[in-house]
């Protein structure tokens, strides 16, 4: 892998939230960036802010739910003589609601982005990562350890994400490609202001109180540090670590607590 001064990093879902914060963090570390997202206008705003600091940023409009989008962007990047050392598969959103509120189509929509979109990113970026003996970072969640009432679709997708990361870690190590699973809990991001159709609602309040959310730049520093140091997994936020600890060692107790008090889902924009 290249040194930090010339690190080449691809980030999906880079137009806002954690993706944009990771772009800013890697720009601070002197990396060359290839940023992908569906929302071209917001992606351009992110790139403009980073270029104003002297960062080397290339942006491409891409949708991980479309076959070939990530590969096309990587191909154009390679045409300019660039390889890729790190791929951060960050694109995703959350479908929420109880089983009775959701339809099969909404479960499919959740998996199309969070699971199959992730798989497309992996398949289409692996040749570049193999060539660089680089690292794949997969954005999971503490929801990949514990499924809260009213969040079955999202939790199912993140359980699958964690399973994929754990399987690929062994498979890709033989090819010189590392895998880091990132499992955040509550971080400042747009995910709770995005409805079940993946539409972002500008100005919608975050239902999670500010004292419980980690600031996005701080979370991005923790995540980037784990990726660069080659860690297998990083669990982000103190409460996230507590939840995962309970899920691993006191699962029956955690399950009883969630059943007793419920994990009431706060209304989101678009509901």
Image: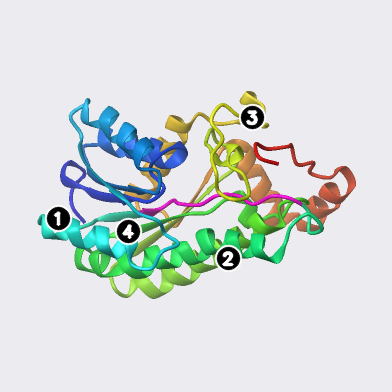
How many badges with numbers are in the image? 4
Tell me how far mark 3 sits from mark 1, CA to CA: 40 Å
Judging from the image, what secondary structure is the residue with disc 2 in?
helix
Q: Nearer the viewer, mark 1 or mark 4?
A: 1
**Contact (CB < 8 A) between labels 4 and 2?**
no
**Percent position (x, y) of residue 104?**
70, 66
The residue carrying mark 3 is 212
**Percent position (x, y) of residue 68?**
33, 67
Marks 1 and 4, the one that precedes in the sequence: 1
* Dot label at residue 160: 2
Does residue 103 appear left or right of residue 162 in this picture? right
**Percent position (x, y) of residue 256?**
86, 52
Few, some or many residues within 10 Å of mark 4 (<14, 14–19, 20+): many
The residue carrying mark 1 is 82
Tell me how far mark 4 sits from mark 3, CA to CA: 30 Å
In the image, is residue 127 above or below residue 203?
below
Tell me how far mark 4 sits from mark 2, CA to CA: 20 Å
The quarter of the image holding the N terminus is: bottom left
Q: Residue at x 42, y 37 (%)?
A: 220
Does residue 109 appear left or right of residue 43 in this picture? right
Few, some or many residues within 10 Å of mark 3 (<14, 14–19, 20+): some
Tell me how far mark 3 sits from mark 2, CA to CA: 26 Å
Q: Main secondary structure of the magenta part?
A: loop
Q: In the rendered structure, which segment of residues is drawn in magenta?
A: 88-97
In the image, is residue 206 above or below residue 4?
above
Few, some or many residues within 10 Å of mark 1 (<14, 14–19, 20+): some
The residue carrying mark 4 is 135
Marks 4 and 3, the one that precedes in the sequence: 4
Q: Residue at x 36, y 70 (%)?
A: 123
Judging from the image, what secondary structure is the residue with disc 1 in?
loop
Marks 3 and 1, the one that precedes in the sequence: 1
* Dot label at residue 49: none
């Amino acid at each position: 892998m290249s040194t930090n001064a010339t690190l080449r990093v691809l980030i999906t879902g880079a137009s806002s939230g954690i993706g944009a914060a990771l772009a800013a963090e890697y720009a601070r570390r002197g990396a060359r960036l290839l940023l992908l997202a569906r929302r071209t206008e917001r992606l351009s705003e992110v790139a403009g802010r980073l270029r104003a600091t002297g960062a080397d940023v290339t942006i491409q409009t891409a949708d991980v739910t479309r076959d070939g989008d990530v590969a096309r962007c990587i191909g154009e990047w390679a045409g300019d003589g660039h390889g890729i050392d790190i791929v951060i598969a960050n694109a995703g959103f959350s479908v929420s609601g109880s089983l009775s509120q959701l339809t099969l189509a909404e479960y499919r929509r959740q998996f199309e982005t969070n699971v199959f979109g992730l798989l497309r990113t992996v398949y289409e970026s692996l040749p570049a990562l193999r060539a660089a003996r680089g690292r794949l970072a997969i954005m999971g969640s503490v929801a990949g350890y514990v499924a809260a009432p009213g969040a079955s679709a999202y939790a199912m997708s993140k359980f699958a994400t964690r399973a994929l990361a754990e399987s690929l870690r062994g498979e890709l190590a033989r090819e010189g490609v590392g895998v880091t699973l990132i499992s955040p809990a509550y971080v400042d991001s747009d995910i709770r202001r995005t409805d079940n159709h993946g539409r972002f609602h500008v100005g919608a309040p975050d239902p999670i109180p500010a004292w419980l959310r980690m600031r996005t730049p701080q979370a991005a520093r923790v995540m980037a540090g784990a990726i660069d140091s080659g860690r297998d997994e990083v669990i982000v936020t103190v409460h996230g670590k507590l939840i995962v600890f309970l899920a691993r060692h006191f699962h029956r107790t955690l399950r009883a607590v969630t059943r007793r008090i419920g994990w009431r889902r706060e209304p989101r924009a678009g509901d």
